[in-house]
Image (spheres, rainbow, N blue to C red):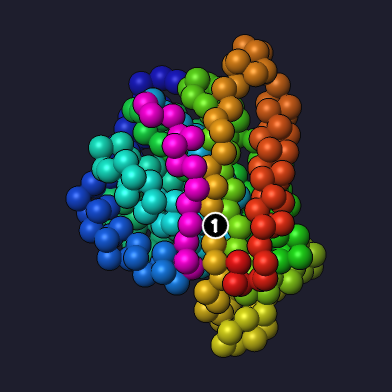
Amino acid sequence: MTMADAEPATHETAKWDPLFTEQVRNTIGPVVNRWYRAEVRNLDNLPATGGALVVSNHSGGMFTPDVMIFSSAYYDKFGYDRPVYTLAHYGVFMGPMDGWLRRVGVIEASRENAAAALRSGAVVLVFPGGDYDSYRPTLSANTIDFNGRTGYVRTAIETGVPIVPTVSIGGQETQFFLTRGNWLARKLGITKARMDILPLSFGFPFGFSVIFPPNLPLPAKIVTEVLEPIDIGARFGKDADVDEVDAHVRRVMEAALRRLADQRRFPILG
């Protein structure tokens, strides 16, 4: 990576404001955590120093609470000396929340931004499956499917940081997600606008929804578990195959997700 490549990424990470992040966590965090009865397990699996790439499934559709639940627990335990940066699609910055999002550590998802954040020693949270994952059908909630995206593995290899698999359960119970609507997106031709899904869900108060109007999330109990770090070099060698690493990460995550599912007594109640 050249210095020219690094400049915009450095600028992105420099926008993180620990005092503002603490204010947001103290204001919004308790509401989100109480609504979802959030539980985050095994944060001690995060490496104590150096960059770490936290790779998680994404749940809950438009109102996914994943970032707030994980970050809130992280800052509660470790304080604000080491930031959590969350990689997000550029579309989330196209609105009035742009400045606030960057101040709490949300950065545009690019290999350059991720590498700069990791090399600074930060924790970087990535959801490779994006909206494709967050709108997975409720009946397939315990499947890890990143839609073929493997860039996170390349980033971890290039920066020499461990991948820390993390799984969350309960988000797909906040409403009933029926289908991603890939077929509908293709039929309507919106895939040309880089929209490859048109999800259909059923919830409160509007009943059936095709993205809009957005239903309010039910207070399903959400459990997040941080798994053991994966040292790619130690496990796969210096010439690690990206697809092999990705398949291993997804296997580990899916096994953990299914274990958490077996522990749940009832949907929503947890």
Query: How many labels sit on residues?
Result: 1
Quarter containing the C terminus = bottom right
Residue 142 vs residue 268: left or right? right
Residue 127 image position (x, y, % from top left): 56, 47
Q: Measured along the vertical axis of the image, is residue 245 above or below residue 254?
A: above
Q: Quadrant of the N terminus?
A: top left
Q: Residue 206's quadrant in the figure?
A: bottom right
SS at badge 1: strand
Q: Quadrant of residue 215?
A: bottom right
Q: Within the image, what quadrant is residue 5 found in?
A: top left
- Where's residue 217, x and y in %? 53, 75
Q: What residue lies at 70% left-to-right and 21% top-to-bottom? A: 241
Q: Amino acid at mark 1?
A: Val
Return the residue nearer the eye: 55 or 4: 55
In screen coordinates, is 82 left or right of 128?
left
User: Vertical placement of 149 versus 204: above or below?
Assistant: above
Question: Does residue 185 lie above or below 110 as drawn?
Answer: below
Residues drawn in magenta = 36-49
Q: Nearer the viewer, residue 100 or 226?
A: 226
- The image shows residue 40 at horizontal and vertical percentages of 48, 52
Q: Residue furthest top?
A: 238
> Percent from the top left, x then y, of residue 32?
41, 67
The answer to if 39 sits in the magenta stretch is yes
> Which residue is at 20% across, 50% downward?
19
Does residue 138 lie above or below 225 as drawn? below
**Nearer the observer, 224 or 28:** 224
Determine if the magenta segment contains residue 249. Answer: no
Q: Residue at x 71, y 66 (%)?
A: 138
Q: Is residue 15 visible?
A: no
Q: Residues within 10 Å of mark 1 (few under 14, many from 20)?
A: many
Does residue 122 appear anywhere in the picture?
Answer: yes
**Residue at which label 1 appears:** 223
